[in-house]
Amino acid sequence: MTPESSERSDEPKRVPSHHSWALVGIFWIMALSVLTIAQGLIVPIVTAMLLALIFSPVRRALGRMGLSSGVAAAIILLTLIGTVGTLGYFVSDALKDSLAEAPHMIADVGDKLKELTGTVQPVMDASEQIQDMATKEPATDTVTIREPGFLSGFADRMPVIAGQIVICLTLTFFLIASGNLFYEKLVQVMPTLKDKRRALAVARTIENQLSVYLLTITLINMGLGVAIGLTMWALGMPDPLLFGVAAFLLNYIPYIGAMAGVGISFLVGLVTFDSATAAILPAVCFWAMTSFEGQFVTPVMVGRRLRLNAVVVFVSFALWAWLWSFMGMLLATPMLLTMKVVSDHVPSMASFGKFLADRDELSRSDRRILKYVFRRDVPLGKRQEAREAKEAGEAKANLPAPTLPDAGPGPKANLTA
């Protein structure tokens, strides 16, 4: 073997770029598959981590009062379980009655909508009759298999849901009770003193921002739920407490949550009240309060720095709703914000954090580039006028230069004479 061949054999083989893209695609396909298949385990873990972040300021406050992390975790978990249990006790009767009356309510909503669209209904009925006559088939006996209802399906899934709740609460207790264990391990892992300080500063900043944001959003949603519950009670809507709890939960879901609340308010108001104005008023109030919260309260209390790109928020919501159903809807925005805060403090992920953020002030060079790229983005009429003016100028420039008239032989003869 010659030295040149040995040197060539020692060189690392470069993987083609299309192979690396294929590996990235395979990785994401496998990751999505794992997230879908193992959602029964991953969802409680993610929820417990977010709950630990939410209550980390409370744990620190209790620690400053002299309580240990374990005692603080026990107080926080018992308070949370007691609050949710008390609220569930008061809501359970109303929820049970609402689920029992759901078929009758749907029928009443259909009748009300028929009254509102009474002028169009005869035409629709006539078209349906004509279609039935055109496609009429001989009568046959049909066998209908009744599928299990919502309550029976929920009862079948109840053991699984109870197990996930136990896993979530137990892990939340251990995460809160561990205190500063994560920071201790981080100090032990980092090699140099400079790396230890930088890693601790970044981790502490991430935890503070996430915990403050999640706690603030939770308090805002609680205030919105109380305001909507009181408004529905003042308007004479049935089960105002149920409306308040629904508003609290739905406000974690971006865009779709507010739309669902408005639609539910309108349908319940349509069944409850006789006049159309009284039926629309609860939906209008629900929309007004959620819009005020989204446009004024949350930006002021959270700040512009943590605001996210609306398109990215909606895509994230659709993705996690497809993967994890209702829990994915609730966890989509907190997880997206977690990625945003981590990207802001990790230099290698700064570009990804910029992409997730809301619209920001552009630099002068970026504005020049955008102006250069979109210089043709003008109305079609102005573009046509500019083109015609340019063509007219070019045609005028291509015309031959004017020549002076010939004076004739007379002057020349006189000069020679």
Image (tube, helix red, strand yellow):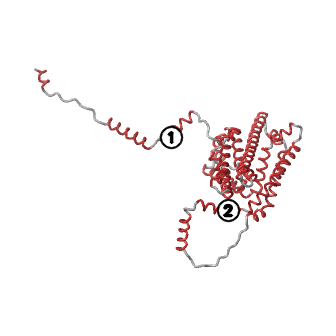
For badge 1, the amino acid type reads Phe
Considering the numbered disc 1 on the image, is that residue within a helix, a strand or a loop?
loop
Q: Nearer the viewer, residue 253 or 291?
A: 291
- Which residue is located at x 69 percent, y 61 percent? 105
Image spot of residue 40 (x, y percent): 76, 57
Image spot of residue 301 (x, y percent): 71, 38
Q: Nearer the viewer, residue 366 or 109?
A: 109
Residue 39 visible here: yes
Would you place residue 89 above or below residue 376 in this image?
below
Image spot of residue 330 (x, y percent): 72, 51
Q: Nearer the viewer, residue 194 or 48?
A: 48
**Furthest-front residue in view?**
274
- Which residue is located at x 74 percent, y 59 percent? 98
For badge 2, the amino acid type reads Ile
Considering the numbered disc 2 on the image, is that residue within a helix, a strand or a loop?
helix
Disc 1 to disc 2, C-alpha distance: 52 Å
Residue 361, located in which quarter of the rendered image? Answer: top right
- Which residue is located at x 67 percent, y 62 percent? 106
Image spot of residue 181 (x, y percent): 84, 42
Q: Nearer the viewer, mark 1 or mark 2?
A: 2
Q: Nearer the viewer, residue 243 or 55?
A: 243
Would you place residue 227 above or below residue 161 in this image?
above
Residue count near mark 1 (Cα–Cα under 10 Å), binned few <14, some 14–19, many ≥20: few
Residue 318 visible here: no
Would you place residue 102 above or below residue 367 in this image?
below
- Which residue in the protein does label 1 denote? 374
Mark closest to the chain's N terminus, 1 or 2? 2
Q: Are marks 1 and 2 in contact (CB under 8 Å)?
A: no
Residue 411, located in which quarter of the rendered image? Answer: top left
- Which residue in the protein does label 2 denote? 106
- Horizontal arrangement in the rendering, residue 41 relative to residue 356 (left or right): right
Residue count near mark 2 (Cα–Cα under 10 Å), binned few <14, some 14–19, many ≥20: some
